[in-house]
Amino acid sequence: MDQVTPDRPARGGHLAFFETDVRECGGTRLLVATGARRDAVTDHLDATHQMAHAHLHDHGAILFRGLARGDAGQFDDFAGSFGHELLSYDFGSTPRSRIARGVYSSTEYPAHQWIPQHNEQSYTSRWPMKIWFYCDVVPSAGGDTPIADSRILYRRLDPAARLRFAAKQLMYVRNYGNGLDLPWERVFHTDDRSQVEAFCATHRIECEWRPDGALRTRQVCQSEARHPVTGDMVWFNQAHLFHVSALDSDIREALLSVVDEPDLPRNVFYGDGSPIETSILEEIRGCYRDVMLRFPWQEGDVLMLDNMLMSHGRAPYKGDRRILVAMAEAASLT
């Protein structure tokens, strides 16, 4: 069960505007900062920035609550006020639409599907350090955005497995198009093959054009990383999500009846191309379940995550749901 631990009474500064409490589940902690008044998300930015500066690296996640419902433009201004240009969703893995300058739909996956925990774009070598989610429309049931602390994941996993992953790294294989996954034109935001090739060369992605015009990419990436500010080691990859074993058995069988395994929309191997043991992937999924913290969305909520310290997912839902996302502060291991 989630536990709520009240913080000390506010004594000025950011705490004069926010009332705070901490929710915890399995070691994952969420700082909930509730505004004293239902002001706009862009009001009291100094207090919001102070709150993030003081607490984000400790908790990994802050939920700003009790704010008036705004719009995509205000959310864009809010996320952009933290000192870094908002990032575009390049080399994405889920369907999204641009809503404002640096604001996207969080995902357009079908409502009945569960999206497993993941650190944003940890399947590649460049990712955002900060990510914000804004709740514009609350679903009638479900649809929460669970979080899980990547530091705890790292510590919980079998050390021998961690060493094996770190030594071999991970190779993500993606096949675009053919109606089975996102077309490459949408992933790379262009229909110019030369631009795709240039992007891949810059980001150390191997690309291969198939005879039917489809695209296949391979990229070897990290399994773990050290946070550049806190120094914490974090579990930082999407092996458990990209691997074919993540699919429901009926979906997996249906795909394999249409394409051979090398042509699956996405899959992951050790960096040398050898298969990853299903048992360790199940262990990883189990660890995520153990430390995952869930909370119901409220209209106007803004969830701010340190993307290396905290993973996120999405629960199935009913009714309308509109969660917007913005990302900033690109980072890599090199």
Image (spheres, rainbow, N blue to C red):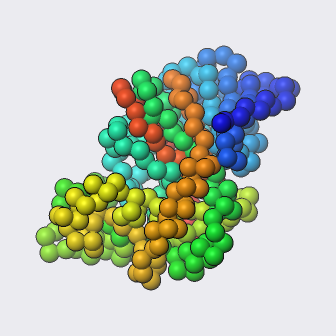
Residue 230, horizontal then vertical, whole percent: 74, 58
Left or right position of 136 against 12: left
Q: Residue at x 41, y 44 (%)?
A: 114
Determine the residue positioned at 53% across, 25% down.
298
The residue lying furthest to the bottom in this view is 272
Quadrant assignment for the C terminus: bottom right
Q: Quadrant of residue 31?
A: top right
Q: In the rendered view of the protein, which quadrant contains the N terminus?
A: top right
Residue 205 location in percent, x, y?
A: 39, 73
| Residue at the (74%, 48%) spot, across then down | 58
Q: Residue furthest left?
A: 212
The answer to whether 24 is drawn above or below residue 45 in the figure is below
The residue closer to the viewer here, 77 or 331, is 331
196 sits to left or right of 259? right
Image quadrant where residue 44 sits: top right
In the depicted view, which residue is nearer to us: 223 or 155? 155
Please state the horizontal and vertical placement of residue 64, each as a whole percent of the image: 63, 31
